Amino acid sequence: MATDASAMVLEHWKQYLDDHCMNHGVEFAVISVLDMPFQDNSVPSFSSNIGLSSTRNGEAGYDAAVKEVYRCLEPGGYLYAIESEWIDIPAILQVFEKWGREPWTCFTEEGLSWHDRFLSAGFEIVSEQEIGYKIFTAEDNELGEASAKCGIPVGTKETAFVLRKK
């Protein structure tokens, strides 16, 4: 099953699979990671590619998403996650100031790293590897567009995790 909180993302995936994979058999469902319709301890594994770090609810949203995944995973179940963390928050705050907008909550709250957040939720970290950095461009999103106009590069680091529910 492929899930996302965005119906548009799922439609793009469905179209891609329809075009490239005969009889893919994948079901699609719009599901928020903050409120998943699964019973406690019932799912053997989840994967997330920036899904947890895209909740847009700040630190409380990140914590709620990790706790919800943990709740649904069966004991010994795995979460395979690639998550991003913002780099150079002072530069990002400069972009917002020059942009004339209030910074998003995630840039003004003190928070945990994904490593620490996973540990505090009860996960065992089986492996962790930084896999790259992404500097945003005007084509990526509105923050990338604003940073390009200001001449201040902003971006994220991406880390791959294999996590096991204890």
Image (cartoon, rainbow, N blue to C red):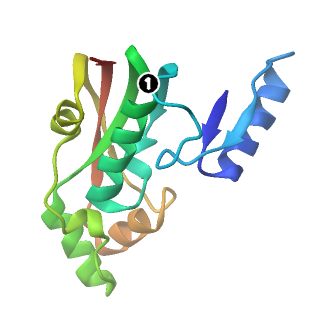
Q: Where on the picture, by quarter, is residue 99?
A: bottom left
Pick the residue in front: 129 or 28: 28
Outermost residue, front direction?
40
Residue 130: where, in percent of width, then height? 24, 27
Residue 158: where, in percent of width, then height? 31, 36
Pick the residue in front: 48 or 70: 70
Pick the residue in front: 147 or 123: 123
Q: Does 29 sit left or right of 47 as displayed?
A: right
Residue 4: where, in percent of width, then height? 60, 43
Q: Does 10 sit left or right of 57 as displayed?
A: right
Q: Name the residue located 52 percent from the left edge and 58 percent from the top edge.
A: 139
Q: Quadrant of the N terminus?
A: top right
User: Disc 1 designates what residue?
Assistant: 73
- Which residue type does callout 1 highlight? Leu
The secondary structure type at the circle numbered 1 is: strand
Q: Name the residue located 40 percent from the left edge and 22 percent from the top edge.
A: 80
Question: Visible in this render: residue 88?
Answer: yes
Please tell me whether residue 4 is drawn above or below residue 126 in the rendered image.
below
Residue 146: where, in percent of width, then height? 38, 72
Q: Name the residue located 34 percent from the left edge and 40 percent from the top edge.
A: 67
Question: Visible in this render: residue 154?
Answer: no
Q: Where on the picture, by quarter, is residue 106?
A: bottom left
Q: Where on the picture, by quarter, is residue 120?
A: top left
